[in-house]
Image (cartoon, rainbow, N blue to C red):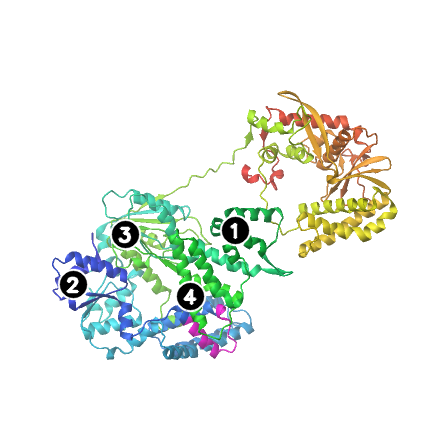
Amino acid sequence: MHSFLRNTAKEILESGVDLQKVTIVLPNRRAGLFFTQHLGSLISEPTWMPEVKTIEEIFYDLAGNRPADDLTLIFELYRVYQDLSPEAETFDRYYFWGEMILKDFNDVDQFMANAGKLYHHLSEIKELESDLSFLTESQIALIRQFWSSFVNQDRDHQEKFLKFWQLLSPLYTSFQASLAVSGLAYSGMLYRKVAESLDNIPRPEKVHHFVGFNAFTGTEEALIKHYITVFGAKIYWDIDGYYLDDKVQEAGLFFRDYQKDKIFGPTFPEHIPTQIDDRKARIKTYATPLKTNQANLVGSILEKIPAGEAWEETVVILPDEQMLFPVLHTLPEQVDKVNVTMGYPVKNAPVYSFLEAVLEMQRYIKEEDGKLLFYHTAVKNLLSSIYLKSVNPGFAEELMAEMQLLNQIHVSAEKLHKGGELYQLIFQKLENDSLFSYLAKLMEALAERLKDEPLQRSYLYQCFKQLTRLREIFAGQDILTINREFFIRLFRQVFREVKLPFEGEPLQGLQIMGVLESRNLDFKRVIICNMNEDSFPPSAGLNSMIPFNIRKAFGLPVQEQNDSIYAYTFYRLLHSAEEVHMIYTTASDQGKAGEKSRYMQQMGVELGREMEEEVVFIPIDQKSPESITIQKDAEVLGLLDKYLIDEHGQSKTSFSPSAISVFLDCRLKFYLQYLANIQEKQEVSEEIDAAVFGNLAHLSMEILYQDFAKRKNRTLLEKSDFEELNKAWVFPAIEKAIRQFYHLEGEADTKLNGQMAIARDVLQKYLHQILKIDEASAPFKLISLEKERKYTAGLKIETAAGAQTVSLKGIIDRVDEHNGSVRLIDYKSGQDNKTFPDVESLFDREHKSRNKAAMQTMFYGLIYQATVPENTLPLKPTIFNLREMFGDDFNPYLQIKLPRAKQGVEVNDYRQFEDEYKVGLKSLLEDIYNPEIPFDQTDDLKKCGYCPYKEICGR
């Protein structure tokens, strides 16, 4: 297999030079390892190996210094910025700008631009752009494209921006001076220092050989030219005629310029290699619908590699580092060794998400009556994490269940601390002076519990290292005040850049690496993932304070140079490849269309040979979901036995009006809810929805009359009672209802949030209106309220197993005796209709306006009469619609009204309709027990709109 590094090592060896007097300079250390391996395999007798260095090491050795870390430099830059700007923003807000400014300063020095003139011109162009009133919209759009960070808003913003741009030149000068005093430097500063003093560099003892370079910075170019002309250095180009000879091929952009250069030109080989055209590699492209499918595809490609082939000759290139773990998890068993040469972002690790969630929780802490309270969503996120679950799994599950049951919006620290030491450490309020020490302590506590998780501990170690560095920087300064909010924002800013470096044996096993790590390396088999535009090559756009035209004028790199570097990195992978597999995604991702990389398009046109293409399909059933039908076999019919009354007159449960109504709506929903016992997912709700409001209204009315009757020791309410009820009983009843509903302690003060306070006020209005209506109809005698009395009945039906008696039950909101009738009152928070054409329609599932409320209140008549058989008074079904009570013509009584009739006939006694009602109910119950009628889906899709089971049905 052709190998540039091996061929170069062979060429140097055959030249007869004394290797001990040679220094090999390469773009990166990884290439140095492979070069040393190749050279070692070519040497047949003991000899001294040459010194192998990177270009960075050459500069840093000559400068006598090493660059400081970015965090230190950004902080130092902020110090200088504060001195120059009286209105400096806070450090966490400045951090992003600081990164960008530092990168610009680095580019200015790396390419040896005149900073004074450059920033002078920048200031001038900003003055020009500050008045955009005379420009067209397209011109404004073009200017904004030149400088992506600038957004023109109003004159006030323009002036602020202009002040900032005018700071850039003094900021650069002052920053350089500040770094010189403190002994710090950034890489561009050191490079420039060396490049501007080349005449003072002593002649090196060894001859330097520069191997495999592509795009030089201005300082690198100056140094290498100096070494070639003055010190006799040699340079070896890793090139191919495919892109060098084609004047529009971006991969050869730099080489074509170097070929014309009077110093670099003569160093090019006489015969340019044409490996890409000569090798005729087998190239295959794959289109996958989803990004995650790529990992499976990589695994299947690797499985087909013949046994015995060296894995070192195969590379998997991952332009997107998030694909690393999916690929590692899908590697076939025959891959015995893997070397990963790329960093994995800690921000994608579970432990980072956990630490971020702990800090985020601090934003939603509140204190009431000396108690520390934590917001339920933040608590739930942490309790759901493996770190807290594993410490005390039972406690975490019980606490989440309790939060849901009691609908707790806030959870007390006291309750959370019962989970153990880690819970006590996490659920506390952080003070400004303990932020660093707290996070360090938390990381150490997690590391202690993750002894068997080396990867997670490695993530923690990287986070801890960065935290320690951040802490050291802040410890030595007095210009920043750290508060909790500042710390959380800074945590996100700084830790998003932290990467976990993987360790391995770089010369053995399957090679997995990022794009730029592949420089100078040759492989027989190349597999590239994410061959999508905006991924490889990456999306266009340089984050810079300096507009495009100014960058280009001063020789700073622009997108054109970036494109060339990535294009070269891609095409040089083809130098030695015999097999190339390129995978791209057709689905859009994060707003980006699934467009194949331009490199694939170019190769299809330029190579002049066919490339295999495979479209990977994921089988998708595009048919409508099949209908779900539950046949009533012996097992299903057995589930219905719980409703039957046994020989002792008992049943496990009973049919309620709600169950009957659900069966009429959808037989399958009845099966799922009442027989399969698939319950709706319960969530802690901060909203006062219709169901919650209705429950509070029912409970308030029950408590209002119940407490009044107990206090007065009578159940008869006279007109004279209502003044006292309105003044003294309504508010306490609502307060008590809220405490009961949310399971608050008996005497606990009900501190209400905004929504609950509004709901309480609305409830008061409703209760006062009910009392107004009741006062008008007083006197009346209370018989029962809600749960005070159970009303049940048995109804004989015919089943396949013979005659059976099913149990019926219901909770009647209020039963009272009024004007010689027993009123069966149901409170409704909706707008239920009180008219129906006939009893038969109440059980007709095909009837479009089937009256559920009428069916329910008539059901109450049935169970009341069965429970109180001695009753001889008329039973009057009554509905108090909360929304309709404020109308002058409000009438709470059921009416039978034919479709075209103007007036309805009031239902004064349920018993007049009892026989007909029982026939309809009996027929419906016999349907439920009929083995020939399955539990199937409703045909009325409108009923599926708010059904909790619609996802099961696929509707």
Q: Residues within 10 Å of mark 4 (few under 14, many from 20)?
A: some
Circle 3 residues within 10 Å: few <14, some 14–19, many ≥20: few
The alpha-carbon separation of the residues under discs 4 and 2 comes to: 46 Å
| Residue 259 image position (x, y, % from top left) | 23, 66
Q: Residue type at mark 2: give it.
A: Ile
Residue kind at label 1, given as amino acid type: Leu
**Residue depicted at 84% across the width and 35% down the height:** 821
Task: Look at the picture and state if 823 lies above or below 6.
Answer: above
Quadrant in which residue 823 is drawn: top right
x and y, in percent, of residue 771 in the image: 81, 47
Please identify the dominant SS of the magenta region.
helix
Residue 383 circle label: 1
Quarter holding residue 715 = top right
| 1 horizontally vs 848: left or right | left
Q: Is residue 864 magenta?
A: no
Mark 2 sits on what residue?
12
